[in-house]
Image: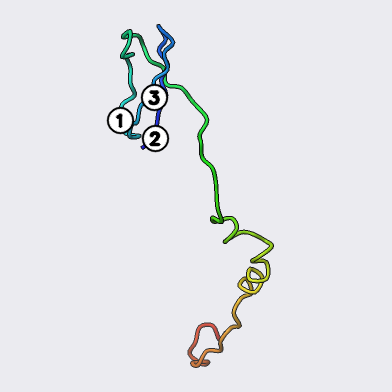
Amino acid sequence: MPIYEYECQKCGNVTEAWQSMSDAPLTTCSDCQGELKKLISSSSFQLKGGGWYADGYSSTNNGAKAESNSKPAPAKECSKAASCPCAS
């Protein structure tokens, strides 16, 4: 569940609330009963460890694998050459 921050327009108090995305936003300050305004704050998202970048998209380790996998497979010949729509 995300943490939302609200600032009171009357007393300036900043409040954090754990809310589901479907929950209605808070409207009144618990200290002074003033109007709350939702704040936009920076996220604390960080990529740590090996993760998806090193395993799936790194050009140093998987460069040769990516090239060999991107070549198309050779076409097979149809066993029904006369009746096959691809024969014409």
Distance from Cα at disc 1 to Cα at disc 2: 11 Å
In front of the other: 61 or 23:
61
Q: Is residue 61 above or below residue 1?
A: below
Name the residue that disc number 3 marks: 16
Disc 1 + disc 3, Cβ < 8 Å? no
Q: Position of residue 22 (x, y in %)?
A: 32, 34
Q: Is residue 73 above or below residue 5?
A: below
- In primary-sequence order, the first of circles 2 and 3 is 2
Which quadrant, please, contains the N terminus?
A: top left
Name the residue that disc number 1 marks: 23
The residue most toward the front is: 49
Under mark 1, the amino acid is Asp
Under mark 2, the amino acid is Pro
Q: Is residue 78 left or right of residue 28?
A: right
Q: Position of residue 73 (x, y in %)?
A: 59, 79
Q: Nearer the viewer, mark 2 or mark 3?
A: 3
Residue at 33 percent of width and 17 percent of height: 27
Residue at 57 percent of width and 61 percent of height: 55
Q: How is the image coloured?
A: rainbow
Q: Is residue 54 above or below residue 31?
A: below
